[in-house]
Amino acid sequence: MPISEHPQLDRDGRLRHLLSIEGLPREVLVRILDAAEPFTDTGSPDSRKLPLLRGKSVFNLFFENSTRTRTTFEIAAKRLSADVINLNVAASSTNKGETLLDTVDNLCAMHADMLVVRHAASGAPHLIAQHLSATRRDQVHVINAGDGRHAHPTQGLLDLYTIRHYKRDLSRLCVAIVGDVLHSRVARSQIHALNILGVGELRVIAPKTLLPAEVERMGVRVFHDMRAGLAGVDVIMMLRLQNERMAGALLPSAQEYFKFFGLTQDKLELARPDAIVLHPGPMNRGVEIDSAVADGPHAVILPQVTFGIAVRMAVMSLLAAAGA
Amino acid sequence: MKIHISGGRVVDPASGLDEQCDLFIAAGRIAGLSTAPDGYVADRTIDARGRIVCPGLIDLSARLREPGYEYRATLESELAAAVAGGVTTLACPPDTDPPLDEPGLVEMLKYRARSLNFANVLPVGALTLGLAGARITEMGELSEAGCVAFGQGVVPVADTAVLLRAMEYAATFDYAVWLQPLEAFLVRGGVAHDGEVATRLGLAGIPTLAETLALDSLLSLARATGVRLHVCRVSSGAGLDRIEAARAAGVKVTCDVAVHHLMLSDENIAHFDPNCHLVPPLRSLADRDALRQGLADGRITALCSDHTPVDDDAKQLPFAEAEAGASALELLLPLALLWGAELGLSLCQTLARVSCDPGRVLGAGVGHLSVGAAADLCIFDPHESWLVCRDTLVSQGKNTPYLGQTLTGRVCHTLRAGQVVFERQDR
């Protein structure tokens, strides 16, 4: 079988779509992070509105409910002077039988320049990108805002940005990802991002029921005992636990989950004294994280949100610069 | 019609014959090999120099989509694809809509297939009513209507008591039971092999356990009931080991592998290629290699296409939402040749797995070229390369992972019961 062309980069190695962190060269990730730096400075009125996407239409195409991610994409696009259109497709045409690709064709006919896509099925943004390529509409860019369990690349990037902001030299860091890795697109993007940038050690901590098969082959060390896994770490990345995970046979109860895998003050003390705690939000206090930790001095959860806007601005401006 | 096939390299895996010789057909049968019968005057001569003349291929699983899924494919389109691929006999699984669970449906299917006069269609009847896994079908009536075996398509029977009764009943009349080893609860929701690739792509996994646990049950039940069991679409090395152990212990069991599982692994899913969404899922490279070896040494009895035409609308969806299956009737021969060449097998050994060996599973006395046998033949050019694309595929199903690739080995003529049912025009 032939190796299919890189779905995210154009012939000159520039970013054409952002579908997944996986497979992106280190330079591309660093370029995005560097490009985000100036966007974090929103102190002066001038820097609140930049003309980089003036005249461009950004469509937020969300097939799954989301408030935070959609809002931050919207803010990012607006700060770049783009026209932003929000489509809540969960309550729209697909319920009337329109297919995903029909929806995309329609938005292209409305002269969309960028599609920010969230979808419940892994690979949906890839499908859209392949469709655009097959129909020679390379001027339209796709940004994956979360697909199934597969990827949430801007989240992975903003987490990377946050860690770089607080810790600088990644090669010396020990990072632990804690929680429902099995269902988490965030975890997958974090794992790729951290490994591409060469983090010193990457751990995942979860019960066996919440780890996907052969996860260690993604370049992580697996721990089932949270106390052992947190020993000496510099960065703790908590994952959100969806309430519906209690319905099946994956976990007995939120209480028991919290007992073994919730981040509490005493478990946090096993990490390095200057450890930081990240969470992609929205948090379930008392399920995966204790309020004392979430609101404590180690948490960088709110800065993550702010950095998220800068990183999304960086991604959009790089895509716009790549052009057709 | 008397047809003289001259100058070809005749390969008959059943007898081990592999030499350049002429073949004489009369009254639908092979009337002579090398030497013509007395007074033979051919109505037509087919020049087969530089080509291989072999038994028509026998495919143990090809979905024709009738009744119920005519928008995906029709008997006409798929039987034309079969003969274009050199297939003269095929078994079709019962997972149509409605399923093949009552004799009228089977008779209609047989009648329609006969009147089209392409490949010979042998329906596999439903083991349970509506494939629902609750009540057994009228196997006697279905058998009289033309069913060669009883199965469930890709729908597992979750209730072991039903499975036991169904096997006991089938064994009473020596009907063969063809089942795919799928553990009902472990396959639920899964779309890809539960390994590194599914983990990376965030696809819900189907563990190898789904196959081995199902096999443990099926093989124990087969041993207990004495039923003739054919395991369809083995997908893992561990599964194959289970089957081999049972056979060594005296269980009457045969098995087949689908051509995609012989050639591809989960890595071919690459960037979510929905044409690689199959049931069972494509498993690891190690599994694929075990299957390739198992087919070569005969632990796997037969190679089948598991042809499943799917319309574009049902495939142009995110991987998990896309309908499973791949179109393969026309790829069976070139891919079998590729496998044989890669393992250094003789043409006889390679072609056996798509002719006399599946013929033995069917017990229909098909798949060989001896004098007196039905003249079901495939004549192909082993060196001709062709591009797999929407235009070159006869099947209405264009859903194949091989789209855009060049394969070697192409059928020139297909004869069934002494009649030319396919002749390539674009030469």
Image (cartoon, rainbow, N blue to C red):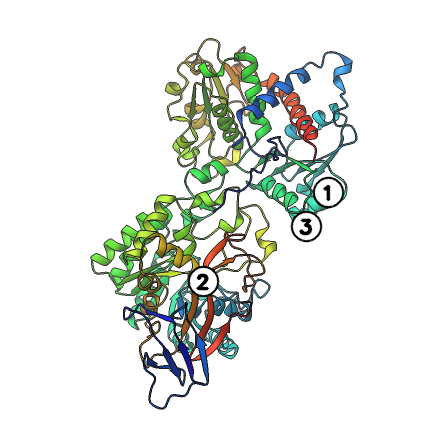
Q: Is residue A74 above or below residue B306?
A: above
Tell me what residue is drawn at x 37 percent, y 23 percent. A225
Q: How many marks?
A: 3
Residue wearing tag 1: A108
| Chain of residue at mark 1 | A
Write the residue at 55% across / 21% down: A160
* Amino acid type at image mark 3: Glu
Q: Amino acid at mark 1?
A: Cys
Image spot of residue B113 (x, y percent): 50, 75
Q: Considering the numbered disc 3 on the image, is that residue within a helix, a strand or a loop?
A: loop
What label does residue B291 carry, if any?
none
| Kind of residue at disc 2 | Leu
Q: Nearer the viewer, mark 1 or mark 2?
A: 1
Q: Are marks 1 and 3 on the same chain?
A: yes
**Which residue is identified by label 3?**
A98
What x and y, as percent, mark residue A207?
Answer: 40, 30
For disc 2, the neighbor class at 10 Å (few under 14, some 14 to 19, many from 20) is many
| In this rendering, position of residue B243 left or right of residue B327 | left
Task: Provide the secondary structure element on which disc 2 rests.
Answer: helix
- Cα–Cα gap, marks 1 and 2: 44 Å
Residue at point 39% right, 59% down? B337
- State which quadrant residue A80 falls in: top right
Residue at the spot of label 2: B131
Q: Earlier in the sequence, mark 1 or mark 3?
A: 3
Q: Which residue is painted at 42% across and 46% down in the image?
A: B265
Kindly report which numbered mark, 1 or 3, lies closer to the viewer in this rendering: 1
Q: Is disc 3 in contact with disc 2, using a CB cutoff of under 8 Å?
A: no
* Mark 1 residue crowding within 10 angstroms, few (<14) / some (14–19) / many (20+): some
